[in-house]
Image: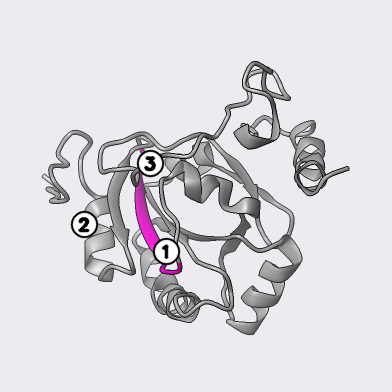
Amino acid sequence: MNIRTAVLIPILMVQAGCSGPLIVDSDSMPAAAPPSSPGAPVLRPRESPIAVGDTIPPFLLMDQAGVGVSAAELSAAKGSVLVFVPRDDSPGSRPAYEWARRHKGFLSQQGIEMVLATPGSGDANARIASREELRLAVLSDPGSRLARAFGIGGDGPWTFVLGKNGRIQLATPGLPAVEQVVMAAETLPGKEKDGFFSPF
């Protein structure tokens, strides 16, 4: 059994008991093969970062407690912030943890959900959440499949604000001002333009 198979089996087991979509790594199966589960999306890497107005790819990732979080759940909120954090030993990880810890409460008061995604395992993310006192979901993205589907990589964090319509309202490398996040979350669908937002 190779490493990719070992990573995908627990996800397949969880999928059997839930209705959300499944992450399937397109590199782990022949091009002509169907997805492992009927209707399961194949996450394909993008060559450039997903942009404002684009629809997010369907996904299901496990948080540090083994609870699945799907794209549909994040799209059901008033707005959600998804922060891709690099490896725990990289320079960009600690600022991302601090940003999340500082702004989580305020964003929750605004009805905006925040989640982090790291390439680490569930156990590693549980240690990170405890060490950094993060009271939010830290999702495990093994092999950075979802990050690659969003078209990002590297050592710095990336921040995406997801609107209730399942579209990207803000896409930026780094960690934006919290006011930017709130304005992006309150943007009406169709009002996005070149990274500028109008809540009216």
Provide the secondary structure element on which disc 1 rests: helix
Q: Residue at x 67, y 17 (%)?
A: 34
Q: Which residue is mark 2?
A: 183
Q: Are marks 2 and 3 in contact (CB under 8 Å)?
A: no
Question: Residue 166: which quarter of the image?
Answer: top left
Mark toward the viewer: 2 or 3:
3
User: Of label 2 and label 1, which has the lower sequence position?
Assistant: 1
Is-magenta flag for residue 162? yes
Q: Which mark is residue 108?
A: 1
Is 88 drawn above or below residue 6 in the view shown?
Answer: below
Q: Nearer the viewer, residue 88 or 159?
A: 88
Residue 162 visible, this angle: yes
Is 70 drawn above or below residue 96 in the view shown?
Answer: above
Residue type pointed to by label 1: Ser
Distance from Cα at disc 2 to Cα at disc 3:
28 Å
Q: Which residue is mark 3?
A: 47
Residue type pointed to by label 3: Glu
Distance from Cα at disc 2 to Cα at disc 1:
14 Å
Q: Are marks 1 and 3 in contact (CB under 8 Å)?
A: no
Q: Nearer the viewer, residue 31 or 122?
A: 31
Magenta span? 155-164
